[in-house]
Image: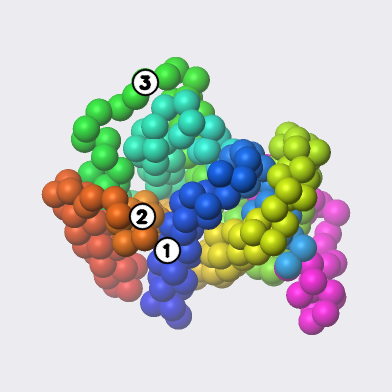
């Protein structure tokens, strides 16, 4: 079962890595980063809500005392995506990626402090290798573009991502159904993101080119949110929060490979080395988890 959960997280990371593809094709139509974040949340919420209403209405039932936790998960999801995209705009893609993927460090520290998880040598080495690989893949070796606000937002995205992992782990330990957690977290994220994403301008962009934009917007929600976050939440039931967060770092590697294959970007020696380090780290962490 743990092997299957590890595969779930890796597949989720690969799907998250497709985000750049959708951004590449949607940005020319005038969609902002916050509007794309709102799209991912709204499409995901409506998709899962439809599934629950048709197949498992009992999953709509939650306890009143669980609402603050679910709201926290939704807010952390919004903080992850919103701060990440804004940091990318203010600094650079490489800076934002590396700051975002400091999250495994936060998660491991919180997991050791609050969940009593063991910080084994294998896990520690894996995280170091992953972060090193992420630096190479993102191009940070070539230099950072400094912007105080952008860097703070980058750290905020990593902390938000870590908070999502911790809060979801708490929800799983309380016996909450993964689908229910995902549904209500997306509902909270949708409400927050729609409030700050200028819905009127968003509607104008869709109305101008509905045939071209609607399929892309729907696919953005399904491929980069519904499927990966559901798999990620399932994996949380079997794997420690630190392990799940660390495995999720395959996203920047996937994003780099997609950019090379689809958009003709050059894969230099540092990127190739980073990919190799991340693959080895994932293998090492998987072996550590199976032991």
Q: Nearer the viewer, residue 15 or 200?
A: 200
Q: Which residues are magenta?
A: 48-76
Image-based side of 196 in relation to 159, left or right? right
- Picture residue at 43% right of the left edge, 78% below the top: 4
Q: Is residue 10 left or right of residue 115?
A: left
Residue 70 among those drawn in magenta: yes
Q: Which residue is mark 2?
A: 263
Q: Which mark is residue 146?
A: 3
Across and down, in percent, residue 56 comes to 80, 79
x and y percentages locating residue 51 in the rendered image = 76, 75
Front residue of this view, candidates 7 and 124: 7
User: Picture coordinates of residue 213 (x, y %)?
Assistant: 66, 56
Q: Are marks 2 and 3 in contact (CB under 8 Å)?
A: no
* Residue 55 visible to the viewer: yes
- Locate the N terminus and report the quarter of the image it occupies: bottom left
- Mark 2 → mark 3, Cα distance in angstroms: 27 Å
**Label 3 vs 1, first from the N-terminus:** 1
Mark in front: 2 vs 3: 2
Residue 14: mark: 1
Residue at image coords 85%, 67%: 61
> In the figure, 270 relative to 143: above or below?
below
Of 290 and 251, the residue lying toward us: 251
Q: Secondary structure at mark 3?
A: loop
For mark 1, give the secondary structure.
Answer: helix
Q: CA distance from mark 2 to mark 1?
A: 17 Å
């Amino acid at each position: 079962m743990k092997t299957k959960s590890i595969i779930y997280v890796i597949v989720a990371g690969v799907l998250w890595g497709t985000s750049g593809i959708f951004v590449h094709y949607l940005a020319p139509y005038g969609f902002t980063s916050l509007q794309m974040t709102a799209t991912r949340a709204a499409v995901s919420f409506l998709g899962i809500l439809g599934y629950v209403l048709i197949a498992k209405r009992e999953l709509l039932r939650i306890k009143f005392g669980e609402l603050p936790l679910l709201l926290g998960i939704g807010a952390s999801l919004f903080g992850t995506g919103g701060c990440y995209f804004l940091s990318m705009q203010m600094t650079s893609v490489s800076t934002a990626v590396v700051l975002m993927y400091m999250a495994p460090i936060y998660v491991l520290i919180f997991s050791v402090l609050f969940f009593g998880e063991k910080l084994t040598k294998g896990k520690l080495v894996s995280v170091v290798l992953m972060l090193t690989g992420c630096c190479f893949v993102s191009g940070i070796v070539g230099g950072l573009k400094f912007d105080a606000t952008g860097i703070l937002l980058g750290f905020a995205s990593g902390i938000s991502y870590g908070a999502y992992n911790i809060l979801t782990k708490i929800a799983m330990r309380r016996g909450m159904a993964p689908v229910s957690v995902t549904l209500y977290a997306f509902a909270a994220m949708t409400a927050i993101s729609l409030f700050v994403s200028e819905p009127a301008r968003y509607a104008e962009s869709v109305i101008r080119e509905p045939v071209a934009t609607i399929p892309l917007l729907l696919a953005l929600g399904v491929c980069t949110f519904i499927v990966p976050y559901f798999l990620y939440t399932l994996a949380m039931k079997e794997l420690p929060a630190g392990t799940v967060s660390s495995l999720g770092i395959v996203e920047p590697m996937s994003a780099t490979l997609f950019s090379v294959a689809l958009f003709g970007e050059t894969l230099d020696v540092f990127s190739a080395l980073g990919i190799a380090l991340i693959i080895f780290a994932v293998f090492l962490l998987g072996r550590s988890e199976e032991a």
